[in-house]
């Protein structure tokens, strides 16, 4: 007698131990994702203190940008290398790289060191995200996958709330360096548990990895960010370094386009841009990333420097924005999945986000807590309305063959937009701050005070009382002007949303998990993995809502749901556990199983001798029809993906999921 856990066949006596190992492994994967997700939010509240200690407010944006660029470029490589060489070893390597980067960030003595170490940390962070989600698919059976993916989404929700608070607490109680050191014990525990408990099925999928394309797109993005962040200040707009960097970026872009046309597995398939929904969604996603991370990086600076609140309290003040984002991102995805109507969300979301930026521009050094909380909430509310939906509508617009690359493409643009937004926000801020402080400090001696104040905001407390209000106002307007300049960019995205065509949603399109919607790392899944995720979630949801009644009616039988469940189990000899012991392993009450057995025997669908259930010819026919009904219920969800020319791997996926979801030990039938 055997069980099947996470796609692996095991003896009944070891099934409980195997399930325990899976849960422990999931815990370790959650720890790995935790430190990566936490790093997106915990650093922001520490940034004002970091730049004060290390000097260089003008370099603040690069602390975030370096991480975002490195993780964005590395994510697709981690995914494909994991497919090719084994995900467990690659996941362990990603943790080690991330922890080394974290330790070095904590030891950094100046801004260039910190920026370089943040890039190293980002290389590992991209791997933590993509590999942890992929490993879940390797070790968790389909009927449980939705629940575990929900846990990963919950990690993102929790870190979005806790990150700013923890960052502030570490700065106030310990040191900003603990923002990075906190990763070390958590990551070490994850490493030990993964080495001891994680058992990933060995699969090898060969890829022709587009190393050159990855390097080129990262180089193009770096050139553009250098031009926007250094132009007009470090480099004059007509200087040789800036012109040379701009020309280099253009050349690299042309080279990238040429490489992608010929690549067997391109980083960004160019033919996707012929699909209007993908092209528009990618542009909107870029802008949403631009606005979100630009604001999240500089709002803590406004709160700590201008409002004078502690790092911990700045995290508290950020909560309305985070709560607004989580609320609407969750609700919008669920509403769209259930109603099939989605266009209102990107239209309304971009409009509210633009309004939120204009409200943030109205903030001053005398703004009250209620006013700030309201403005923060509006901004987050708008972001959440559009973030989930962009992934969903792209998945709905493409063919099955392009499902994986289209999903990764639209999230890739959000990641690049985040890096670009932080850099542009930083350029605008430092330029405006320089101008406004020069207006406040006019004399030669005072100009030195302006230079010191730009490098270290804490110098504000050492200013003469007569100069402090003006300097504080200069900081306030320099930051809030950033939001004003960002608003037209979001309004451009608002205009683009009107060109989206609201196609009917196919049944297999379901709201992406929170990790997929909120992570700065691009999603990297194959078309099969994306379809498997959606069908597994829908299949297990249907199971909880009475799938056995549905497939029994479709097959034309009048049976108890538990009777259909037993017939489907008996159709698979490798799962033929004695019915008397099913209650122990399946969570189905013994009286229910006994009633089903009596019905099956009375209808002569099976014979029961001792503890053995043997299907009769009529029983085998009934089980086959029930299995076909379950398979048909999945194919209905696929819509036009299940066309005459459907690919072989999609057929195999439906057969696999139909068998596993219909005859699962852990799935409880509707009673």
Image (cartoon, helix red, strand yellow):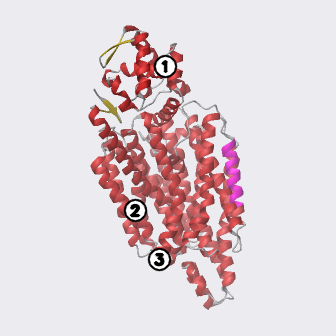
**Label annotation for residue 54:** 3
Quarter residue 591 falls in: top left
- Quick check: 180 above or below 558? below
Q: Can residue 248 be spotted in the picture?
A: no
> Magenta includes 348?
yes
Under circle 1, the secondary element is: loop
At horizontal 40% and vertical 70% (from top left) the residue drawn is 106
Residue 489 is situated, as x and y percent measured from the top left of the image, at 66, 56
Who comes first in sequence, dot 2 or dot 3?
3
Q: Say which label, 1 or 3, has the lower sequence index.
A: 3
Label 2 sits on residue: 183
Circle 1 crowding by C-alpha within 10 Å: few under 14, some 14–19, many from 20: many
Residue at mark 2 to residue at mark 3: CA–CA distance: 21 Å
Instruction: Measure the C-alpha gap from mark 1 to mark 3.
Output: 70 Å
Q: Which residues are magenta?
A: 344-358
Q: Which residue is mark 1?
A: 560
Can you tell which of label 2 and label 1 is closer to the viewer?
1
Residue 250 pos. (x, y %) = 53, 55
Q: Is residue 287 above or below residue 575?
A: below
Labels 2 and 3 touching (C-beta < 8 A): no
Q: Position of residue 521 (x, y in %)?
A: 48, 52
Image location (x, y in percent) of residue 232: 60, 70
């Amino acid at each position: 007698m055997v069980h099947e856990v996470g796609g692996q066949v095991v003896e009944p006596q070891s099934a409980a131990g195997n399930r325990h190992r899976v849960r422990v492994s999931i815990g370790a994967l959650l720890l790995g994702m935790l430190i990566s997700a936490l790093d997106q939010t915990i650093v922001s509240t520490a940034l004002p203190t970091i730049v004060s200690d290390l000097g260089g407010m003008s370099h603040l944006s690069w602390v975030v940008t370096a991480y975002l660029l490195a993780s964005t470029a590395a994510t697709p490589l981690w995914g494909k290398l994991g497919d090719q060489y084994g995900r467990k070893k690659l996941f362990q390597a990603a943790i080690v790289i991330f922890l080394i980067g974290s330790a070095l960030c904590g030891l950094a003595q100046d801004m260039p060191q910190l920026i370089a170490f943040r890039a190293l940390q980002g290389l590992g962070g991209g791997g933590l995200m993509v590999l942890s989600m992929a490993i879940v698919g390797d070790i968790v059976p389909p009927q449980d996958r939705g629940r575990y993916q929900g846990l990963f989404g919950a990690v993102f929700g929790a870190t979005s709330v806790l990150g700013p608070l923890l960052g502030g607490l570490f700065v106030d109680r310990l040191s900003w360096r603990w923002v990075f050191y906190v990763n070390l014990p958590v990551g070490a525990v994850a490493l030990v548990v993964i080495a001891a408990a994680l058992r990933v099925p060995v699969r090898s999928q060969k890829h022709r990895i587009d190393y050159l394309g990855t390097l080129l797109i990262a180089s193009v993005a770096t050139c553009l960010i250098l031009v926007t962040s250094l132009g007009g200040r470090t480099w004059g707009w007509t200087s040789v370094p800036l012109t040379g960097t701009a020309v280099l970026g253009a050349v690299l872009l042309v080279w990238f386009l040429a490489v992608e046309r010929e690549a067997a597995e391109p980083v960004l398939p160019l033919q996707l841009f012929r699909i209007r929904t993908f092209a528009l969604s990618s542009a909107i996603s870029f802008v949403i990333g631009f606005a979100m991370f630009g604001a999240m990086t500089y709002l803590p600076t406004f709160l700590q420097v201008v409002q004078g609140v502690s790092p911990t309290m700045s995290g508290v003040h950020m909560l309305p924005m985070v709560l607004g984002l989580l609320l609407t991102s969750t609700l919008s995805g669920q509403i769209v999945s259930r109603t099939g109507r989605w266009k209102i969300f990107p239209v309304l979301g971009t409009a509210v986000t633009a309004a939120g930026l204009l409200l943030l521009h109205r903030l001053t050094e005398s703004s009250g807590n209620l006013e700030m909380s309201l403005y923060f909430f509006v901004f987050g509310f708008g972001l959440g309305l559009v973030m989930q939906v962009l992934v969903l509508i792209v998945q709905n617009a493409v063919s099955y063959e392009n499902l994986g690359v289209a999903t990764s493409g639209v999230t890739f643009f959000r990641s690049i937009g985040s890096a670009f937004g932080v850099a542009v926000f930083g350029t605008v801020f430092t330029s405006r701050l320089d101008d406004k402080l020069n207006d406040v400090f006019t004399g030669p001696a005072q100009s030195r005070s302006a230079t010191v104040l730009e490098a270290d905001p804490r110098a504000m407390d050492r200013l003469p009382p007569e100069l402090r209000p003006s300097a504080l106002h200069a900081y306030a307007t320099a930051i809030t002007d950033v939001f004003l300049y960002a608003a037209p960019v979001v309004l451009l995205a608002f205009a683009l949303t009107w060109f989206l065509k609201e196609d009917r949603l196919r049944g297999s399109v379901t709201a992406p998990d929170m990790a997929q919607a909120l992570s700065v790392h691009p999603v990297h899944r194959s078309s099969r993995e994306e379809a498997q995720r959606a069908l597994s979630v829908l299949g297990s949801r249907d199971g909880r809502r009475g799938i056995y009644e549905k497939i029994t009616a479709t097959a034309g039988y009048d049976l108890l749901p538990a009777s259909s469940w037993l017939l489907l189990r008996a159709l698979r000899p490798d799962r033929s556990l004695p019915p008397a012991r099913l209650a122990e392993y399946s969570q189905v009450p013994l009286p229910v199983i006994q009633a089903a057995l009596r019905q099956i025997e009375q209808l002569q669908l099976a014979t029961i001798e001792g503890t053995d259930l043997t299907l009769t010819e009529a029983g085998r026919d009934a089980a086959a029809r029930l299995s076909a009904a379950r398979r048909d219920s999945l194919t209905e969800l696929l819509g036009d993906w299940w066309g005459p020319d459907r690919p072989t791997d999609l057929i195999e996926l439906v057969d696999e999921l139909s068998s596993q979801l219909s005859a699962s030990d852990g799935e409880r039938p509707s009673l």
